[in-house]
Image (spheres, rainbow, N blue to C red):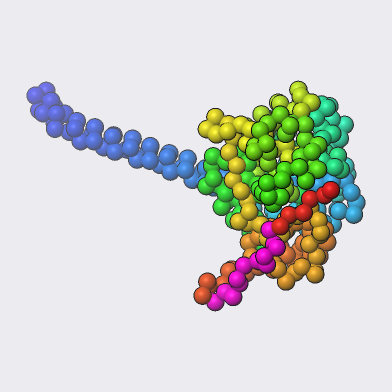
Amino acid sequence: MPISMRKRVLRRCLPRFVCVYASLAVSASCVFSLFSLFSRRNGLKPSTAIILTVSDAEEHERLSHVAFDAIFRDIDIPGPYAPVVVREGGTNLSSFFEGITVVEASRDIEREAWGVSFHLFSGIYGASVKPAAIRWLAFSEYEQAWIVEPDVAYTGSWARLFSKYDAVDGSDLVAFNTTFRFGENKTTWNHWRACVYCKYVDPWRRQASLLPAFRISRRLALELFSFLNTSSRSGHHEAMLPTFVTAHDAPHGFSWTDLAPDVGYVRWRPVFDDARASSIRRDSLYHPVKSPRAHERLSRTFSRPPPHPASSSHSGPPPDIFISSFPS
């Protein structure tokens, strides 16, 4: 082929090659973007840990088994959430641990890690599992974690509850706000009186939250741990944690979303038992549920899809369902 003809063919075909190449590049970019989105949404790299805290009390072992099954049975592994068990003592859940991260907790280790603040922060029983869970999250690869006690039952899918709050990306704390269940009197709850940290913040910033099930961000966990392990200004975690959040305002501080819309019955006492079963409602949290049988029944009561709104006769919880009771 003469050189002049080759040049004409090249001039004619080159734009087509450029267009094809550009199209392929755009397609590859789109495929990569879609794959990245798919990866995030399908949990190939989960950003949220689901932590079940388990104590060493033998009488709670069966309850821990039931809670483990209820929380993790509809969470895909691998998936959008990373299942974790933080346990203190020799609780026997080994047969359930395949694919599960297990964090061993002890009071001696947490006392050393948290310093003098551990005694007040850990609570009236001095359990190490919740401080251990918060400290583990602070230095983990996860952006946030749900921390759930085994005596919490949910009348729905835990996975759907977790995904519901995925949209609340900016919240460092998702927890049941119980601050104003005492009206304007913030002296009646003993954990406020014992909270040393709370005495150094404005009274209106003093907050309360029941924390049998809550979500906390890694940055809040790290900031809280960094403060407490170098300070004696501590307090019970259900007073200290929410007050610490409101003492550090957004946008440069922390934010809090109330879990109240998903609370059916959450108190310190009395225990939720058969006598209160008539007040059960769908997709709601119940605490404390100490009986494995009651826990299992609550977890499976609404295992079927919800009824059509028009056919539902539910008119809401009894008037006292959100009233909280704290230990004196």
Q: Position of residue 130 (x, y in %)?
A: 77, 40
Q: Main secondary structure of the magenta part?
A: loop
Q: Is residue 206 in view?
A: yes
Q: Position of residue 79 (x, y in %)?
A: 60, 48
Who's the residue at 79% across and 26% down the image?
A: 232
Q: Is residue 63 above or below residue 123?
A: below
In this view, the residue in front, 4 or 274, is 274
Q: Position of residue 211 (x, y in %)?
A: 72, 46
In this view, the residue in front, 141 or 12, is 141
Who's the residue at 33% across and 35% down the image?
A: 25
Q: Is residue 4 left or right of residue 169?
A: left
Q: Is residue 251 above or below residue 278?
A: above
Q: Is residue 50 left or right of residue 61?
A: left
Q: Is residue 315 magenta?
A: yes
Q: Is residue 203 above or below residue 227?
A: below
Residue 234 in which image quadrant? top right
Who's the residue at 54% across and 29% down the image?
A: 252
Q: Position of residue 95 (x, y in %)?
A: 80, 51
Who's the residue at 19% across and 30% down the image?
A: 14
Q: Which residues are magenta?
A: 311-322
Position of the N terminus by quadrant: top left
In this view, the residue in front, 41 or 119, is 119
Q: Is residue 81 in view?
A: no
Q: Is residue 217 magenta?
A: no
